[in-house]
Image (cartoon, rainbow, N blue to C red):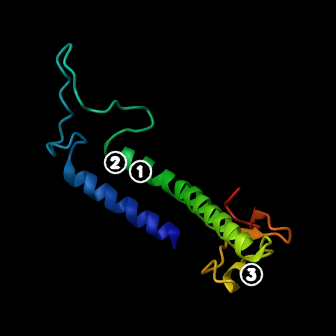
Amino acid sequence: MRSATCTLAISCLVVAAAACGGSDGSGNGAPPAAPATGEVTDTPATTASSSGGVRGAIEVMAAAPGQADDAACAADRQTLTTAAEVFLVTHGSLPTSQQELVDAKVLTELSPRFEITSDGEIVPAPGSACT
């Protein structure tokens, strides 16, 4: 499903970029005019990794799944850490599983990205993209 979603999103970006024309925001397809010598502009500098137009959009889309995985891992780890701390304060010991957190109503659902070991350590689940 992720592949189909990414393909659809890239297709939409290609169509939108083609309809817009150039990447200068004017929509006329012409590259932006170079500033006169000494003139200060508020246009951000372009780098080799962030080109405009369709290519730039595709580069951003290609990096998005990895960035989304990283963000989801960080969010899940923080949620579990906070839930384990609440459990420790209210029960006097660290949880030995996520299910224990759910049963205590400290967590609403299990995370597929992490596990809690019998000594209360939060570790990536087998096969998880989290490290």
**Marks 3/1: CA distance?**
43 Å
Q: Quadrant of residue 9?
A: bottom left
Is 33 or 130 nearer to us in this picture?
130
Q: Residue at x 20, y 32 (%)?
A: 32
Tell whether 122 sits left or right of 74: right
Residue for badge 2: 54
Give the structural element (helix, strand or loop) at label 2: helix
Residue type at tag 2: Val
Q: Residue at x 26, y 57 (%)?
A: 16
Tag 2 near tag 3, CB within 8 Å: no
Residue 76 % position (x, y): 61, 65
Mark 3: few, some, or many residues within 10 Å (few <14, many ≥20)? some
Residue for badge 3: 100
Q: Residue at x 43, y 32 (%)?
A: 48
Which label is found at residue 58?
1
Tag 2 near tag 1, CB within 8 Å: yes
Is 124 or 128 nearer to us in this picture?
124
Residue 118 % position (x, y): 85, 72
Depth check, mark 3 against mark 1: the one in front is 3
Tell whether 93 sits left or right of 65: right
Vertical placement of 73 versus 4: above or below?
Answer: above
Residue 113 appears anywhere in the view: no
Residue type at tag 3: Glu
Q: Earlier in the sequence, mark 3 or mark 1?
A: 1
Depth check, mark 2 against mark 3: the one in front is 3
Residue type at tag 1: Ile
